[in-house]
Image (cartoon, grey):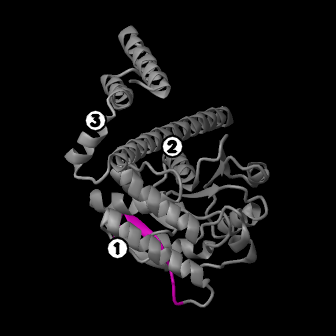
Amino acid sequence: MSSVVIVLPAYNEATVIASVIESIQLQGFTNIVVVDDGSTDGTGAIATPTGVHVVTHKLNRGKGAATKTGIEVAQRLQADIIVTLDADGQHLASDIPAVIQPLLSGACDVVLGTRQWHSHDIPRYKVIHNFLGNAATWLIHHQWVADSQSGFRAYSRHAAKLMDTQADFYDYDSEVIREIRVKGLRWEQVPIRVRYTTYATTKPARQNVVSGLKTAAKMLWRNIS
Amino acid sequence: MLQPYQFIVAALSLVMIGFGVERYLRGGKGQTPLKLAVRLIVWGGMFAITIFPQLTYDLATLLGIEGNVNAVMMIAFLLVFLLIFKMLSVIERIEHQVTLLTRAEALEKFEQHDQRRKE
């Protein structure tokens, strides 16, 4: 039986973190790592009584840094499969079995959860933002994927060990794509559902077109500096 | 005949060069040959242009730019751009180091907590 560890990088998600954890536990996944990325609203304190592993960054260092810390902890917990999800509740825990299936069958090393852009539930700006992210990833890292900015991904132990990323913020997602190509990892894209609640689309730390452009500029900067 | 501003700028340039050379020879922290060279070029250039304004015309001719002021401005912009580039690189490096420290501290605490839980 493969050991699956779920990683939730969280920054100021006190409103939803308990319900996100509960939804994952209801799917039978009890090994959960919450990385409290310097939250100021008590996210870590709310997550602790739910029985998950809570790791705390004293300072907010970004989604990429928090995800890397979570993956590191998952490796120390001897995870065979590591799943990363956004902690704002936009991803559905019921999609986890489908996302990890290709890893369980040994078909690939990395699974990229891919949002379905034709869905009417996805705001238009998200579609544009993702297209720009895909284009920037393809230009800089030379790999086209359908959803380069998705935080819903799954890695085999082998893949997690090989990943060598430098990015600390949202550019981390694109660096993973580069690592897949450079390290010659086998990958698959699995459709996932998303729900953009009022909470997820209005929180201050969300990704938007401006932050997307900043992320693209950072990716470019890292390549030329 | 030198104007008062030429004396002031030339003196300032020489002081800055003096500080740089002294720090480099003392082996001060972060003093590299490249840093010394940049300092000599920037302040040495300022000194040379102040004392010998004719040099700006020679520079303009050399660069193929019409007008000595344009040539000086272009080089100044280039230097500022290089400085910004250097500063951004330093900021990026420091940011990354802060992240490494934060992550290492978080992992260490997790490890200690996990150890206590197992005991």
Res. B75 in view? yes
Residue type, mark 2 in image: Arg
Chain letter of disc 2 in the image: A
Q: Which residue is at the front of the view, A157 or B7?
A: B7
**Element marked by disc 3:** helix
According to the picture, the residue beneath numbered tag 2 turns out to be A76
Residue type, mark 1 in image: Trp
According to the picture, the residue beneath numbered tag 3 turns out to be B55
Q: Residue furthest front?
A: B1
Q: Which residue is at the front of the view, A52 or B107?
A: B107
Question: Bounds of the magenta span?
Answer: A106-118
Q: Closer to the camera: disc 3 or disc 1?
A: 3
Q: Give percent across and percent down for residue B70.
A: 36, 50
Label 1, residues with CA under 10 Å away: few <14, some 14-19, many ≥20: some
Query: How many numbered discs, if any?
Result: 3
**Element marked by disc 2:** helix
Q: Which residue is at the front of the view, A212 or B33?
A: B33
Q: Give percent across and percent down for residue A210.
A: 57, 67
Q: Give percent across and percent down for residue A153.
A: 49, 66
According to the picture, the residue beneath numbered tag 1 turns out to be A144
Query: Which residue is drawn at the image coordinates 27% and 61% (left, top)?
Result: A184
Q: In the rendered view, would you say A168 is above or below B103?
A: below
Chain letter of disc 1 in the image: A
Alpha-carbon span between mark 1 and mark 2: 32 Å
